[in-house]
Each structure stands twice: as C-alpha cells, then as structure tokens.
C-alpha cells in the first residue's frame, strides 16, 4: 500500500507540473506574440502619458507607422524599455531642434532603411532619437494601444494633442 | 460523434504541444541551420548546402544581455529586421575597434560583430556596431551533421 501512496503523489505532482507548464507557455505566447502590459514613467511623453507612471497595453501584431507610440529596447541599454512616439519611418527626412530652449539650431537627417525615428511628446525633457539616433525595427517591442492604469487615465492612445 | 471528439482531443493536444514548444524555443534553446560561409571554418567549412551545419542556440543569455568577447551570437539585421545573422562578438561596449581606416569606440548598449571568414562576411565593418537588443541568442554547439558535433569556443 505504501507504493500506491507514492504512485498517487507522483501522479499529482506530474499533473500539477504539466498544468504549470501549460499556464506558463500560454502566458509566454500571449505576451510575446499578441499583447503585453508595459509601465511607462517620466516626463518625456507629457501630455500623452503621466510622468508619475502609467501602465499601458501594447500589441505586437501590427507594424508601427508614423504617429504610433511604441515600446522598444533602448539602443543604449537592452534592459530598458522606453516608450516614445514614431515621428519618422525609413526614408523620411526628419528635422529636429538640437537643444530646444537653449538655441534654435536644427539638423535634418534621413532615416536609414530598417529604422524609425522616435521622439517624446514633451521634447524639452526627452531622451530619444535626437540623442541615441534612429532605432532599428528589431528593437521595437510593440505598439501602445490603451492606457490601463491608473483608472482616471483609462483610454486609447491617439495622435499627439497639440499643446 | 466519436470521431469528432477524437479530432477535438487531438487538436487540443497538438495546440498545447505547439504552445509549449514555442515557449521552449523562445526561452530555452532552439536549433537553427547556418547558411553561408561567413563563419568558416568554425561553421560551414564546406561550401555545400547539403552539408550545412545546424547549431544549438541558447536563449538564457537574453535575460541580462551579458556577453563576452568571442561569443557567437544570432542577431536580427539592423537593416532588414526579418533576416537573422550569425557572427562572433569581437567588441563589447566601451572597447575600441580598429576598422579599415580609423579607430572606433563601441557605444554603450552596442557590440561589434565580425564573421570568422573576414573575406566573405557582411558584419559590423559594413553596418557598424549593433545594439545588444538585436541579439536573439548565443550559439553553444554544432548538433548536425553528427561528425561535426562539438562545442563552439
């Protein structure tokens, strides 16, 4: 009778193990191929996102186009995931002010193939392509759809509101 | 209705198996074929596509992106993000690389990759340092053909 106790215990363990594996795999496939939540904080996307933090829902299905807000791996540190707006696609000519508020000097760059140009909505305080250059498509993690938390900010992310 | 039930059971099992397979391939390791001879003689020493090497690519390195000089990695091309290349890391962030005419510093968050077969390799000497975020895995060993099974150094 002792062996059948261990038999049953073993079966229960296997069943739980398989269940955990199924749940983990389902979560992995959903967050890596469909949609995932991301936490964005900082002043660079005012007024679209709140500086003290928003949780947003991002989807991985569509290819980002001009005007989309995207989550991507920073070219300066692959462990960081900034959220910025796509301002230029490959081939676009992007003009930007080098130091807004300091001077009016501006430069124009053609976005190279396979890259996008991202800028924060609040360019006075935003680390974006003006500092680290165009971002290759391979670093883009997803396109932001909705602000999810806190509840007061619930709503879709749309084109930049003109300040 | 027995056959319908059977079909549904098989589909469910196949679906679950597929999802678990995808997760293992993304998080743990996968086997990929090597095309081209840019990593000769380490990979694909003969120019014959019937004898292409298949290598084991481990994905655990993507948790923290800590690589060392000499790692052979798979990465997405900076210009055509759907293409994947296999090259060796020869420069880590902050190091200096002597390119054709001048000396270049590898920026933070980037690495310099070159193929072992310098004559026939499209690598950082052409498209510059690549962001570490483009790396999709590290090659640990050759698994096919059987006579070439070995660890990559």
Image (cartoon, rainbow, N blue to C red):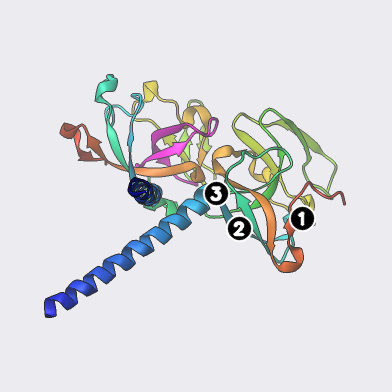
Q: Secondary structure at mark 3?
A: loop
Q: Is residue A96 magenta?
A: no
Can residue B99 be seen in the rendering of this structure?
Answer: no
Q: Secondary structure at mark 1?
A: loop
Which residue is at a point 40% across and 25% down the rendered structure image? B121
The residue indicated by pointer 1 is: A48
Relative height, residue A138 to residue B38 (above, below): below
Q: Is B78 placed left or right of A149 in the picture? A: left
The chain containing the residue under callout 2 comes to: A
- Image coords of residue A39 (percent x, y): 62, 61
Q: Is A97 placed left or right of B55 in the picture? A: right
> Residue lying farthest right?
A163
The chain containing the residue under callout 3 comes to: A
- Image coords of residue B43 (percent x, y): 28, 31
Which of the pair B58/A135 is nearer the observer? B58
- Image coords of residue A80 (percent x, y): 56, 55
Label 1, label 3: how far apart the Cα atoms are: 23 Å
Near mark 1 (Cα within 10 A), the count class, few <14, some 14-19 or many ≥20, is many
- Image coords of residue A95 (percent x, y): 78, 35
- The magenta stretch is B70-94
The chain containing the residue under callout 1 comes to: A
Label 2, label 3: how far apart the Cα atoms are: 13 Å
The mark that comes first in sequence, 2 or 1, is 2
The residue indicated by pointer 2 is: A38
> Residue lying farthest bottom?
A2
Which residue is at a point 42% across and 61% down the rendered structure image? A23
The residue indicated by pointer 3 is: A34
Q: Cβ–Cβ below 8 Å for labels 2 and 1?
A: no
């Amino acid at each position: 009778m002792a062996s059948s106790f261990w038999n049953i215990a073993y079966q229960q363990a296997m069943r739980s193990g398989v269940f955990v594996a199924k749940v983990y795999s389902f979560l992995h496939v959903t967050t890596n191929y469909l949609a995932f939540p991301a936490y964005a904080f900082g002043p660079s996307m005012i007024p679209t996102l709140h500086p003290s933090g928003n949780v947003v829902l991002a989807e991985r299905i569509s290819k980002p186009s001009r005007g989309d807000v995207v989550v991507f791996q920073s070219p300066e540190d692959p462990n960081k995931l900034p959220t910025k707006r796509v301002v230029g696609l490959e081939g676009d000519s992007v003009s930007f002010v080098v130091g807004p508020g300091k001077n009016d000097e501006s430069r124009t760059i053609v976005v190279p193939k396979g890259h996008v140009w991202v800028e924060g909505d609040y360019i006075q305080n935003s680390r974006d392509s003006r500092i680290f250059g165009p971002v290759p498509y391979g670093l883009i993690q997803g396109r932001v759809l909705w602000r999810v938390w806190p509840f007061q900010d619930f709503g879709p992310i749309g084109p930049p509101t003109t300040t | 209705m027995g056959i319908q039930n059977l079909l549904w059971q098989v589909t469910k099992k196949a679906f679950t198996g597929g999802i678990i397979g995808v997760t293992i391939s993304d998080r743990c390791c996968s086997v990929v074929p090597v095309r081209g001879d840019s990593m000769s003689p380490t990979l694909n020493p003969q120019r014959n596509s019937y004898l292409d090497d298949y290598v084991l690519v481990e994905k655990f390195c993507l948790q923290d992106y800590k690589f060392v000089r000499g790692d052979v990695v798979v990465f997405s091309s900076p210009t055509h993000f759907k293409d994947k290349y296999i090259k060796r890391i020869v420069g880590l962030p902050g190091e200096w690389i002597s390119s054709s005419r001048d000396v270049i510093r590898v920026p933070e968050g980037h690495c310099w990759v070159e193929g072992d077969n310098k004559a026939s390799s499209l690598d950082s000497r052409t498209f510059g340092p690549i962001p570490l975020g483009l790396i999709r895995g590290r090659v640990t060993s050759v698994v096919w053909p059987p006579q070439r099974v070995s660890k990559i150094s």
